[in-house]
Amino acid sequence: MRQENLSKTEKDIISESYFQTVFRRFRRHHLAAVSLIILIILGGAALLAPIIAPYDPDEIVGTFSGAPCKEFWMGTDQIGRDVFSRLLYAMRVSLLVGILATFISTAVGVVLGLIAGYFGGIADMVIMRFTDMVMSFPYILLVLVAASIFEPGMWSIILILGFVDWPGIARLVRGNVLSLRETNFVKGNLVAGMPLRHILFSEILPNTVAPILVYATSVLALSMLDEAALSFLGLGVRPPTASLGNMLNGAQSLTVLTRQPWLWLPPGLLIIILVMTINFIGDALRDALDPNSGR
Amino acid sequence: MSHSHTDQERKIPLIEVENLKKYYAIKGGIVTHTTAHVKAVDGVSFSILEGETLGLVGESGCGKSTIGRALVGLEKPTEGKICYEGQDLAKLPKKEMEKIRTHLQMVFQDPYSSLNPRKHVFEILAQPMLYHKVSTRETVEKDMVRILDMVGLPRNVLGRYPHEFSGGQRQRIGIAKALSLNPRFIVCDEPVSALDVSIQAQILNLLKGLQKELGLTLLFVGHGLGAVNYVSDRIAVMYLGKIVEIGEAKEIFAHPVHPYTQALLNAVPIPDPAEKNKEHYLLQGEIGSSVNPPIGCRFHPRCPYATEICRQKEPMLLETGSESVHYAACPIVMTSKEAWK
């Protein structure tokens, strides 16, 4: 192994060995490895929905509330749309909402956390008080207000969730930056006269990526749950666009709940599976990315 | 010995520290305000000549590391001046300061935290060199190999991560990092105290050799007199934020004047059992508080020679009258009246 590596250039050894280590440690968590495979399959299915889906998700193609049969694997909904096709498209929407909302909140949280942690003083105080304020604000209210101002829909829910979920990340990053700022390798680079952008983005940030990534997975799971909850209440993604949340909407009626499980069981199960797999992966990442956990 | 006196006077000091003070505010109260100050460094003056090694010794918390950090710009002095080649560092324009930055480098105490765990040695060393244009993309690898060779590491360490190395190897990388910017002055902040005893000697020899080879000027901070004496030309002894004695290393070892220096020397274990029963004065009690240092001589609560006047007046550094340059701040031992402020 060593022999083989030595013959290559130094750069190669580096990039290979780091990801190899992470991958090897990740694989040790069997649950997470299985979760990753499931998530990849589901994500692929969502991505390829236009190819896989047998019908147009918004088109009425069959009988009302038809039970699963050969033609419609998961039956049809109350107005005769194919549940399987809708499910694929719904997963697309839910994943998109989750990923974009997580992306926004991570970006906001990282920037604010970095500023608060590194510069301290007044910047820190203002940012952290603002963070506390956002944290203590019930987001349902925010959604209601936003829904009355803007058109409720996928994009507004992405923005709302994105700007509501960042405080956790901001706090996490701030805490990490506070301790990293005092480490000798940061001090050493200050002594070496490295510019601020190098200190922040090359020394400090890479050392907080692991906790951010782990936290982001739980934000991803949470924002997908939030999307489902809001859409279920009719405040999120608007029909006819399918989302996992508004597909569950039908389960509000007792007949559907008791007599037509194919209408709510698939989206419900899919939410559970997605959230669980994402959380398992986050757990395994925490261990795999820790640079100090040894060989 | 007498010629060294005139020799030193002729040289220009590379580093000059004048009345350096560093106070840290203690905040408290319901409405946060400054309640007191920790006087980490409280009026210290000394100079370091080009090419010499000054050892700085004292107990933990006496302010020796703070001085080191202030010299490389990690701490902003509360008061006083730090001059590099006669220029006041605090008054230098930013552009000038950036040029000088690389001349003043530091080797840290804890080799386990002084290297970024996310970067391999190649990045750790190359980034500052490229940023300061000490080296170019084409030559950087060659330059790094040359520096690694100086600190006794093979070239294949470049692709490895810090956690793959032992403490001694990491400290060598830390030294390589300090050397990579072609510095003239390096602060070594207790560079061996976190290492195994067997490795300590290797690192000390390395530092000593490099200093000679490259003509570096060093400030060697340490709390073990043995290690400090081994590498230093001159030694300054600190107690509670003040220098109590400063002079040539040999002279301080042969004729320590200040009672604190004597106690430090007595605290060095003697391997000869016949010597064991000899009477030695060993320090009693703890180092005093740097928030409210003792009035008068700061050492008086622990000093065997303390008299009434020691509790009232603060002694100044005075020449001991030996042939080499040697100052101490104890008029009782030196029996000289003018030593009091």
Image (cartoon, grey):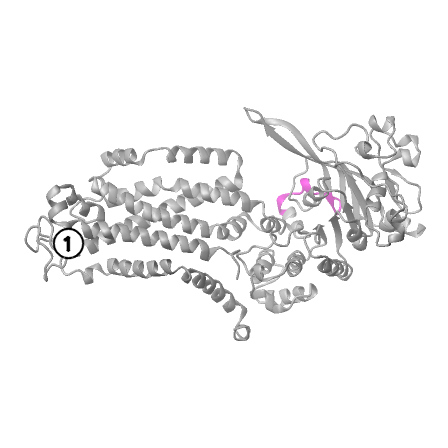
Label 1 sits on residue: A83
Residue extent of the magenta highlight: B83-95
Specify the amino acid type for callout 1.
Val
Where on the picture, by quarter, is residue B205?
bottom right
**x, y percent for residue A221:** 32, 48
Relative to A56, B200 lies left or right: right
Relative to B146, A121 lies left or right: left
**x, y percent for residue A281:** 37, 55
Asked if residue A251 can be seen in this view, the reply is yes
**Where A28 sits versus A119, above or below?**
below
Q: Assess whether residue B175 is covered by the magenta stretch.
A: no
> What is the number of callouts on the image?
1
**x, y percent for residue B317:** 85, 37
**Where A16 sits versus B3, above or below?**
below
**Picture quarter with the C terminus of chain B:** top right
Under circle 1, the secondary element is helix
Q: Assess whether residue B89 is covered by the magenta stretch.
A: yes
Relative to B243, B75 lies left or right: left
Q: Which of A120 and B195 is in front in this view?
A: B195
Name the residue rendered at 28%, 43% in the picture. A226
